[in-house]
Amino acid sequence: GHGGNAPREPPPRRRGQPGPSRAALRGCGLSAQGSWRKAVRSDCCEAGRDCLSTLTTSTEDGAFQTKGHNTRILSPEEAERLANDRVLVSDFKQLKLEKEAQKNWDLFYKRNSTNFFKDRHWTTREFQELKACREFADQKLTILEAGCGVGNCLFPLLEEDLNIFAYACDFSPRAVEYVKKNSLYSTERCKVFQCDLTKDDLLENIPADSVDVVTLIFVLSAIHPDKMHLVLKNIYKVLKPGKCVLFRDYGLYDHAMLRFKSGSKLGENFYVRQDGTRSYFFTTEFLSQLFRAEGYEEVVNEYVHRETVNRKEDLRVPRVFLQSKFQKPFSKT
């Protein structure tokens, strides 16, 4: 897993426009130290803490949000820019990025460790889903946070819900170390381990068919599309029949996708950032095929369109996320 590092592309800023206030940064799960452009957003902020709304809603940070099955409509300029960006990064460099993926995520956590706002509270959505998983109020639940990053979501959850045991893993050994150093870390409540979800068997750390909920939040996008199915296959083994994977990640034509400069493209909807970490932008069709091919059933699979509006500067920042839920069937048909 490579997750726990949700949207980190801040809105475009006009020259002379002041950066956000300390309070605004805090509300976004950012720390005020260092450059706000480099700061890391916790998933629980812009990536949809209000994701339960079904109609267009105005959220407390001035964003408008809708959910649905349609991709975002591009402006003619955006469409032209994407159509013209056809040159792919060389095969040699692509192989190097794949080989150095772990190193690049490790460096990412090293650079950003002080920017993590540790106590972001989990989105309403995850809490509601966990409530719904229980057959009775105090039922003990076992969860797996695949790609836990430094625990931005893990620790608030353990604090909030005492009847949870959490498995959590990340691709980056450094991220796992940060989790273990957290004062809230307790081996009675969680088991945290380093794991490359594309090749390390989860069964080495988690019993088969034992997990009630798996969260896959801003993790899959960091993995090469050719290897994504291996992650889903791996998770399938530890998930109880009838239980679900909660997924959230970047959607097609998200603002972050449109900001990549030419020379960043690795493949269709797949790009490399300046720091060598990679990002894929999902369509509902692609995700659905991916999960179904591994035997999951689709429960929910939709785009969350979120427009952050800065009225003073008249800047509109279109964010697109995919929010989905897939179930391991009770019996393999």
Image (cartoon, rainbow, N blue to C red):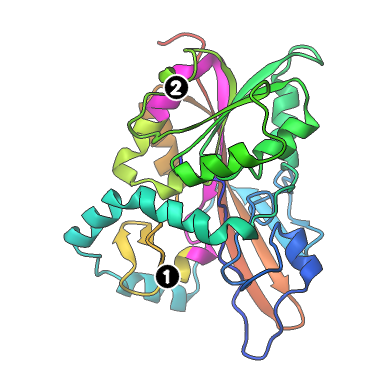
Relative to 108, 88 lies left or right: left
Relative image position of residue 243 (x, y in whole percent): 57, 19
Relative to 147, 181 lies left or right: right
Task: Name the residue at the left extreme.
Answer: 92
Could you tell me if residue 217 is visible in this image?
A: no
Q: Tag 2: residue type?
A: Tyr
Q: CB of mark 1 within 8 Å of CB of mark 2?
A: no
Q: Residues within 10 Å of mark 2 (few under 14, many from 20)?
A: many
Q: How many marks?
A: 2
Q: Is residue 249 magenta?
A: yes
Specify the quadrant of the image occupied by residue 319.
Answer: bottom right
Q: 58 or 69, which lies in front?
A: 58
Q: Quadrant of the C terminus?
A: top left
Q: Is residue 191 magenta?
A: no
Q: In the displayed structure, would residue 55 be above or below residue 192? A: below
Query: To which residue does mark 2 refer?
Result: 236
Relative image position of residue 42 (x, y in whole percent): 64, 53
* Secondary structure state at the residue bearing disc 1: loop
Q: Tag 1: residue type?
A: Phe
Q: Residues within 10 Å of mark 1 (few under 14, many from 20)?
A: some
Q: 44 or 29, which lies in front?
A: 29
Relative image position of residue 310 (x, y in whole percent): 72, 75
Q: 126 or 299, which lies in front?
A: 126
Q: 256 or 333, which lies in front?
A: 256
Q: Which residues are magenta?
A: 232-256
At x 51%, y 54%, the residue is 109
Query: To which residue does mark 1 refer?
Result: 260
At x 72%, y 36%, the residue is 184
C-alpha separation, residue under disc 1 versus residue under disc 2: 33 Å
